[in-house]
Structure formats: C-alpha cells, structure tokens
Amino acid sequence: MLKFDLQISAIDFDGDTYLRDLDRAISKLIREAARDWLIAVLDHISGGKHTVGDSFPIQTGEAKGSFIPLGRRLGVPIPITPAPDSRYNNKRLRPNLSGRGADKSSFHVPDSAQGVGKIEDTYEFTFNADVHHFDINELTKKYESSVTSTVAWKSMEAGATAFNSTLDKGMDLMPRVNEYFFWSTEGGIKV
C-alpha cells in the first residue's frame, strides 16, 4: 500500500540570509547616495554648473581637489584646471594645488557585505575636508574678490538633497522580510 505522509512542523525564517542580503542592499544604497551627493556638490563649487548664478572659476583646485579620493572610490571623475593667472596677463595658469586638497580630506563609505548574519548597527557616509577657503566659499556671501566667490556655494545643501532623494527612491529596493519565511516540512511517500 502506498501512503503519503506530510507534516508541517513550523514556519522558519532564514535570518542569516536576510541579514546578509539586507546588509548588501543598504551598503549599496549608501554608496549610490554618496555618489549622487558628490556629483551635486561638484555642480555647486568652483568650475561647476552653478545654479546660483555665479561663474567663479577654479583658482588653485585645492577645494575641489579635496574630493578626489572620494571620487576615485565612487567612480566619479573630477577634472581640475585652474584659471589663468591675471598676474601674468592670463598667459599662465594658476598653480594646481588639487593634490594638497586631496591630502586634507577623509571619508567613509560602507563596503558591501560585512559577512553572513552580521549587520552594522549604523550605516554612514562621512566626508571631511580641512580646506579653509572651501569653508568660506561654502557658508558665506562674500565681497568682490579674486580669490572668493561672490555667492555662497551651498554645495553641502545640494549634496544632502541629492543624498536623501537617492535614499528615498532606494528604500523600495530593500529585501522584503516576508520572502525569507518558509514552511519547514517533513514526510514523503511510504510504501
């Protein structure tokens, strides 16, 4: 006699796989948001698109150069060509100090998976630059000068908007917890 015996023992949750997939998805989303942040910031500093109506040229590239290491990590090219120097009848470019700016910055962007079942308590993107004239151009409306922009860049505001927009759009791409539940069964055909 053929007998089919099926027992449903429980609903199980594959937590290790869920946490690994969630970790990867969050890390990837933070990297994409950081990339969009960088592009928005670069559009608002010297040599950028300048939606604020200022066309201030790159002087030495030190401020913009502070983004070079982050650009390398995120795959965003950052061309820097300083403006002609009026001291030499605009026949010579100003010195390119972008390397000095690169040395004055630091950042953190999460890597992909941290390991099976391990999820960071906090995911973060940080960028720090210690370039004095970047701070001046970023935060204040300035006077007419050959070394500062006449309007505040507000690049960090633009970057924050782009970062948050990417996060908002990406939340729909997170792994769905219900897809990691399954029925644990025992049984089969017995003769």
Image: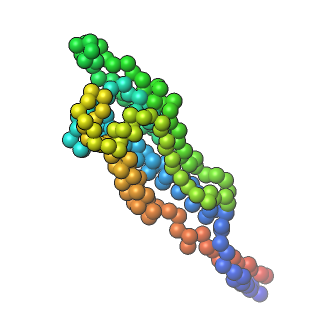
Q: Quadrant of residue 81?
A: top left
Q: Tell which residue pokes out farthest to the left in this image.
A: 53
Q: Tell which residue pokes out farthest to the right in this image.
A: 191
User: Where is residue 91 drawn, in percent x and y?
Assistant: 25, 12
Q: Quadrant of the N terminus?
A: bottom right
Image side of residue 41 versus residue 144, left or right: right
Q: Give the residue at x 52% y 68%.
A: 176
Q: Is residue 99 visible?
A: yes
Q: Give the residue at x 27% y 19%.
A: 84
Nearest the eye: 155 or 29: 155
Q: Is residue 20 visible?
A: no
Q: Quadrant of residue 142?
A: top left
Q: Give the residue at x 22% y 13%.
A: 89
When the figure is inspected, residue 116 is found, relative to residue 83, above or below; the finding is: below
Q: Quadrant of residue 77?
A: top left
Q: How many numbered badges does the structure rendering display?
A: 0
When the figure is inspected, residue 7 is found, relative to residue 119, above or below; the finding is: below
User: Where is residue 85 drawn, in percent x and y?
Assistant: 28, 18
User: Where is residue 184 drawn, in percent x and y?
Assistant: 69, 76
Q: Give the residue at x 61% y 73%.
A: 181
Nearest the eye: 29 or 131: 131
Q: Quadrant of the C terminus?
A: bottom right
User: Where is residue 56 drawn, in percent x and y?
Assistant: 26, 32
